[in-house]
Image (spheres, rainbow, N blue to C red):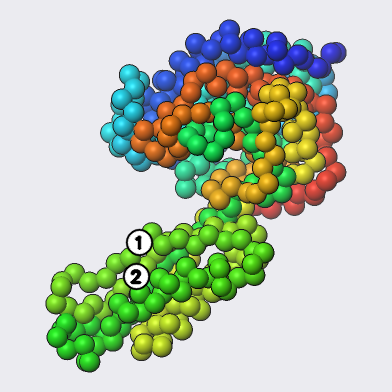
Amino acid sequence: MDQRVDPAELRAHGAAIADDIIGLRRTIHRHPELAFEERKTADLAARTLDEAGFEVVRGLAGTGVLGILRGAAEGPSRGLRADMDALPLTEETGLSFASSEPGIMHACGHDGHVASLLGAARILADHREHVRGTVCLLFQPAEEGAGGAKRLVREGLFRDFPMDFLFGHHLWTGPGFPKGSFVTRKGIMTAASDRFEISITGRGGHASLPQYTLDPLPVLADLIHAVYAIPSRRLDPFDQAVVSIGRVAAGEAENVIPQEATLAGSIRTFSPGVQQEVHRLLAETAEEISAARGCTGTCSVRRGYPCLQQDEGLTTAVLRLAEAFWGKDQVIEKETPFTGSEDFSYLAGAVPACFAMIGCGGEYGLHSPKMELDEEMLPLLSAWEAYLAIESGALPSTDGTEEKKKEVPQ
């Protein structure tokens, strides 16, 4: 069996079905669904996979769909993942196929992810003779903050459908990377993302009698400066962290010194050790600065997605294949991680994985109510995903660079 396939052939196939791929994207865009509510999107994915001759499994983590294609010869089992959910955002694009659901929009490109992977399914079905082993196309619910990937792992995705390795992609709009670029890196790809809230309790009273109060507002002011100083003055200069305050609150009347004040924000870190240290320093800072003014300060942290750790050997192989498909000048091996976060990190914590960004052009970035995809990129992404699925059939079942413990996230 001749496994290798010419990238130009797959690009031509993607171009031939471009109208269908774009049509799928527009249907999904017009009918966006929030986390764990992606029923119409799942129906469309399952129907398209079935028509392409894939085995279809439904109900994964609620609304998830898995399409399975078994090749003509033995080889590894690998997966490609697309996320399906939209954002709670009112669309302002003015597109003819804009969201029909008030307050819900595909502003992060997940409509394009689903459509392109469904396009890849059609291309793979027509090139089945080139496929070794098993290709699994995963349509995942609830990436936007709800941790659909975590639930998939916890409920036994890789136990029930073993995969030797996994690939994921994200369309990137707006400034940062040129249209048609392929961006990835070895090591940490995206940051861990946590949320924190500091509560300050003092003693409220009349604004004309501050001497009888323990005013939490000066504490709040001091804490804002102290929190922002944690990355630059409390951490080792070679440890990276981003701490941002997004909300402050205190009081309800102009002539009342409030009893309580709060500030809340986000934490981005790139290693578990630094993550723990930032958590500790926030708690220590809240307690000590509050106590210095006679108040009580506490800090609570809500953990979000962990760092996305790329498999080094697999990423090296993907970079080589990307140069063959996209062209060497279009492949960017990023020097530093992305400060955003991705729940693909849970999947990458269970099996060797590689995640990449695809430059998609456009004026507005992800999560903007005016964000638009350049739809010309969708057939190209479909062709690339098919190429990656075929060519990765030559990789060994275990790449030997990392041992995955396949821990189940709690």
Residue 247 visible here: yes
**Mark 1 or mark 2, which is nearer the start of the sequence?**
1
In the displayed structure, 402 sits above or below 71; it is below
Q: Nearer the viewer, residue 13 or 323?
A: 323
Question: At x 40% / y 71%, what residue is drawn?
Answer: 224
Query: What number of labels is visible?
Result: 2
> Circle 2: is it few (<14), some (14-19), or many (20+) Cα within 10 Å?
some
In what quadrant of the picture does the N terminus appear? top right
Question: At x 56% / y 27%, what residue is drawn?
Answer: 179
In the picture of the structure, the residue carrying the numbered disc 1 is 247
Q: Nearer the viewer, residue 192 or 38?
A: 192
Question: Within the image, what quadrant is residue 166 found in?
Answer: top right
Q: Secondary structure at mark 2?
A: strand
Q: Residue furthest top?
A: 16
Question: At x 17% / y 78%, what residue is drawn?
Answer: 256
Q: Position of residue 226 (x, y in %)?
A: 46, 74
Q: Are marks 2 and 1 in contact (CB under 8 Å)?
A: yes
The amino acid pointed to by label 1 is Arg
Question: Residue 322 shows which numbered tag?
Answer: none
In the displayed structure, 116 sits above or below 215; it is above
Task: Tell me: 315 left or right of 362.
Answer: right
In the displayed structure, 322 sits above or below 409; it is above
Q: Residue furthest bottom?
A: 211
> Circle 1: is it few (<14), some (14-19), or many (20+) Cα within 10 Å?
few
Q: Position of residue 251 (x, y in %)?
A: 22, 72
Question: Residue 262 shows which numbered tag?
Answer: 2
Q: Position of residue 114 (x, y in %)?
A: 52, 27
Q: Nearer the viewer, residue 34 or 106?
A: 106
Q: Nearer the viewer, residue 241 or 400?
A: 241
In what quadrant of the picture does the C terminus appear? bottom right
Q: Secondary structure at mark 1?
A: strand
Distance (Cα) linking label 2 and label 1: 8 Å
